[in-house]
Image (cartoon, rainbow, N blue to C red):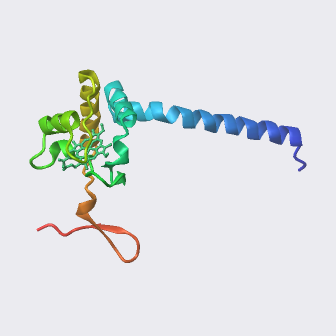
Amino acid sequence: MKIRPRLLFALLSLLFLAYSLCIYLAPVMNTVHLGGHKTAEGRLIWQKYNCQSCHQLYGLGGYLGPDLTNILSSPGKDEKLVRAMIYSGTRQMPSFNMPEDELNLLIEFLKSTDASGISDPRQFKATNYGMIEAYETN
Ligand code: HEC
């Protein structure tokens, strides 16, 4: 069968457009999946203040500060501490003088990561063959 170049071009263009549409719609889909608009807006606040440069989510991100995926349910930590930390900072953590509504959205976002599962890299060890395994718990 002889494939006509024009037809091939049209077909590939169509596939390209369809694929692009999927890519651009993905964040919208994820928004719904993550639990609504507040969570998505909270994620934008997280990005706006670049928390990722020092903190990890699901083990990915900067390593100056701790992983914050499950910070809200970590032993000895709660929403109060998170709010105080973001507002006041410490020597290494800058204080973010953000408006109350931004802080609330950020908390919503951290609630959603917390609800999405447990992700503490310290609970896993790397094996010699490049996989990870959970540490034995007694
Ligand atoms: C310049 C790097 C840096 C940036 C940017 C940063 N942090 Fe931190 N953060 C740290 C460090 C370092 C610590 C640990 C400080 C300590 O324990 O004294 C910390 C601690 C925290 C803690 C307390 C964690 C715990 O286990 O006690 C929270 C909550 C937190 N950061 C939230 C945020 C949020 C939210 C943002 C974005 C708005 C942010 N941080 C941006 C460096 C940073």
Position of 34 relative to 92 (above/below): above
Pick the residue in front: 135 or 109.
Answer: 109
Figure quadrant of residue 132: bottom left
Identify which residue is drawn at 42% across, 35% down: 30
Find ligand 1 in the image and state its quadrant: top left
Q: Where the C terminus falls, by quadrant? A: bottom left
Mark count: 0
Q: Is residue 29 left or right of residue 85?
A: right
Identify which residue is drawn at 26% across, 38% down: 110
Position of 32 relative to 120 (above/below): above
Q: Residue furthest left?
A: 76
Figure quadrant of residue 52: top left
Q: Position of residue 69 (x, y in %)?
A: 27, 46
Q: Is residue 67 left or right of residue 138?
A: right
Q: Position of residue 102 (x, y in %)?
A: 29, 25
Figure quadrant of residue 4: top right
Q: Is residue 28 left or right of residue 53?
A: right
Q: Position of residue 95 (x, y in %)?
A: 24, 36
Identify which residue is drawn at 22% across, 68% down: 135
